[in-house]
Image (cartoon, grey):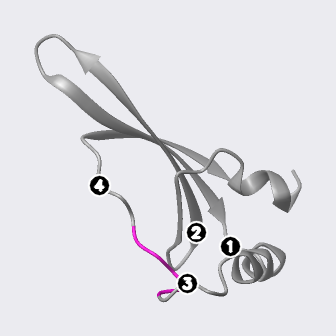
Amino acid sequence: MRNIDMFEKATNVYRTKKYIVKQIINYKVHKEFQNVLYSQDTFYKRTYLRDRYYESKFKDKIDIDGKRLKTACSSRQYVD
């Protein structure tokens, strides 16, 4: 996997102590619950190269680590 692919289609990207997380946020219209926001999360283990790429991409952010956007539900995938 190339670093450029990490943020493809991302709605939000943030960093934790051990991971760089890409969120792809979608919504679904549900008869009973009306609209539901859900997130497909990919957790990339932090490495030197991934951190450098993240920092170059988001160097102008006020909070370089960012924050998670809250959704009603989410799924997770982990990448070493």
The amino acid beneath tag 4 is Lys
Horizontal and vertical percent position of residue 67? 40, 71
Residue found farthest to the front = 60
* First-in-chain label (4 vs 2): 2
Q: Which residue is mark 1?
A: 46
Which residue sits at x=68%, y=73%?
A: 46
Could you tell me if the residues under marks 1 and 2 are in contact, i.e. CB atoms within 8 Å? yes
Mark in front: 3 vs 1: 3
Residue found farthest to the left = 32
Mark 4 and mark 2: Cα distance apart in space: 17 Å
Could you tell me if the residues under marks 1 and 4 are in contact, i.e. CB atoms within 8 Å? no
Mark 3 and mark 4: Cα distance apart in space: 19 Å
Mark 3 and mark 2: Cα distance apart in space: 18 Å
Q: Which residue is mark 4?
A: 70
Mark in front: 1 vs 4: 4
Mark in front: 3 vs 2: 3
* First-in-chain label (3 vs 4): 3
Q: Which secondary structure lies at badge 3?
A: loop
Numbered mark located on residue 19 in the image: 2
The amino acid beneath tag 3 is Lys
Mark 3 and mark 1: Cα distance apart in space: 19 Å
Horizontal and vertical percent position of residue 47? 76, 75
- Residue 70, compared with residue 76, is above or below; it is below
Instruction: From the viewer's perspective, tell me whether residue 57 is left or right of residue 19.
Output: right
Mark 1 and mark 2: Cα distance apart in space: 5 Å
Could you tell me if the residues under marks 3 and 2 are in contact, i.e. CB atoms within 8 Å? no
Mark 1 and mark 4: Cα distance apart in space: 22 Å
